[in-house]
Image: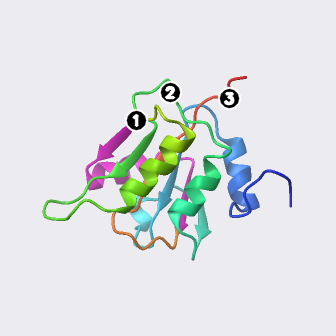
Amino acid sequence: MLYKIPHILSPELVKVMMEMGHGDEITFGDANYPQNGSTQKVIRADGLLIPDILAGVLELLPLDFYNDWQYALMNTVEGDSRPDVWDTYDKIVKNAAPQATLKLFERFDFYEQARKSQVTVLTGETALYGNIILRKGVVVN
């Protein structure tokens, strides 16, 4: 254990975040997330919910403000309602970075974008449309 690293973050996840550079992305997939939307590097976080992981990650990971969006969600398919978990994600992201901007991707465009991520973290999140991508920024002193 180390000081100031949220206990919910595995050593493997912290290592990957440390290795990421400016503009690199990390995808968090819900429990229904398909393998075809994943990167080569996958970290299992079964049983953990994305809001808990997201809060821990954003204590360490700066977001990219040299881009037009800092986090992305998978848009709903016509006829599906807006997921409540999106409000939770927005609150967590805005707590860490109030000026953060959201981008909504159509379902298959989301998978295409997610395949460009450095890593996919597969979770136990059961909320539909619970997937989220974060774009890493720079540390400014």
Who is closer to the viewer here, 59 or 34?
A: 59
Who is closer to the viewer here, 93 or 41?
A: 93
Instruction: Examine the image and state in which quarter residue 137 appears.
Output: top right
Magenta highlight range:
101-122
**Residue 108 on image: x %, y %:** 28, 54
Residue type marked 1: Thr
**Residue 41 on image: x %, y %:** 59, 57
Tag 2, which secondary structure? loop
Mark 3: give few (<14), some (14-19) or many (20+) Cα within 10 Å: few
Q: Quadrant of the N terminus?
A: bottom right
Tag 3, which secondary structure? loop
**Residue 97 on image: x %, y %:** 53, 36
- What label does residue 65 carry, if any? 2
Q: Quadrant of the C terminus?
A: top right
- Extreme residue in the bottom direction: 47
The residue identified by callout 1 is 101
Which of the two labelled residues, at mark 2 and mark 1, occupies the earlier sequence position?
A: 2
Residue 131 can be seen, yes or no: yes
Tag 1, which secondary structure? loop
Mark 2: give few (<14), some (14-19) or many (20+) Cα within 10 Å: some
Residue type marked 2: Phe
Residue located 63% across and 42% down the image:
61
Instruction: Examine the image and state in which quarter residue 2 appears.
Output: bottom right
Q: In the rendered view, would you say 78 is above or below 106? A: below
Which of the two labelled residues, at mark 2 and mark 3, occupies the earlier sequence position?
A: 2
